Amino acid sequence: MNTDFALLSLENPVFHTYLIAACIMILKLMLQPWMTVVRMMRAGGGFRSPEDLKKTPLNPNPQPAQLEINEYVDRSRRLNLNDLESIPGFLVAGLLFVLAGPPLLLAQILIWTYLGSRAAHFIAYMSAQIHDIRAFCWTWSSLSVIAMAGYTLLQAI
């Protein structure tokens, strides 16, 4: 690793690559619940808690059916849960990977593979693709994080 720049600096192209991808994934993680809220408002349902049936300015005509599972809303909710399972691991493994000082090309391949496969997974899930397609997309993101963690571990021992 070139020692002319600090590892956690924008001067480090590996960190710069990670920083861009991490920010995109954090935005995805934080915006997905907003998509769920928008879908709940459009559907007028998909609520989860009994107290959501109280009359409010946002729910002027509450009805028990609003607590029933609404696939339109739940699809977004499941995507959010999948993000919560995947993105934190990437954020931690990616940062540790940066600190291990990998070659730039390896970092770019692993980081962009993760980001691209998560984008493909989002598209596959939102368009209701079969499990095999969603799993294919997910697999590449998982393998990328495993490779980052494995590389970092090998550098540490």
Image: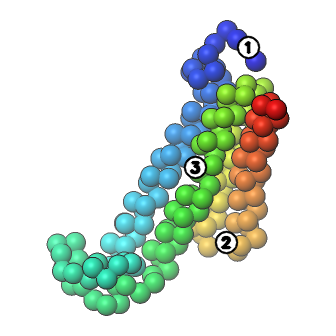
Q: Position of residue 129 (x, y in %)?
A: 67, 72
Q: Earlier in the sequence, mark 2 or mark 3?
A: 3
Residue at the spot 67% in from the left edge and 9% down from the top edge: 4
Q: Which residue is mark 3?
A: 88
Q: Quadrant of residue 7?
A: top right
Q: Which residue is mark 2?
A: 129
Q: Position of residue 40 (x, y in %)?
A: 37, 73
How crowded pointer 2 is (Cα within 10 Å; few <14, some 14-19, many 20+) is rated as: few
Q: Earlier in the sequence, mark 2 or mark 1?
A: 1
Given contact means CB atoms under 8 Å apart, are the residues at marks 2 and 3 in contact? no
Instruction: Classify the position of the N terminus by image quarter.
Output: top right
User: For this rendering, which residue is in front, 142 or 70?
Assistant: 142
Q: Amino acid at mark 1?
A: Asn
**Which mark lies nearer to you, 2 or 1?**
1
Instruction: Classify the position of the C terminus by image quarter.
Output: top right
Left or right position of 43 against 79: left
- Marks 2 and 3, Cα distance to the nearest angstrom? 25 Å
How crowded pointer 1 is (Cα within 10 Å; few <14, some 14-19, many 20+) is rated as: few
Number of residue marks: 3
SS under mark 2: loop
SS under mark 1: loop
Left or right position of 50 against 118: left
Q: Is residue 49 above or below residue 13?
A: below
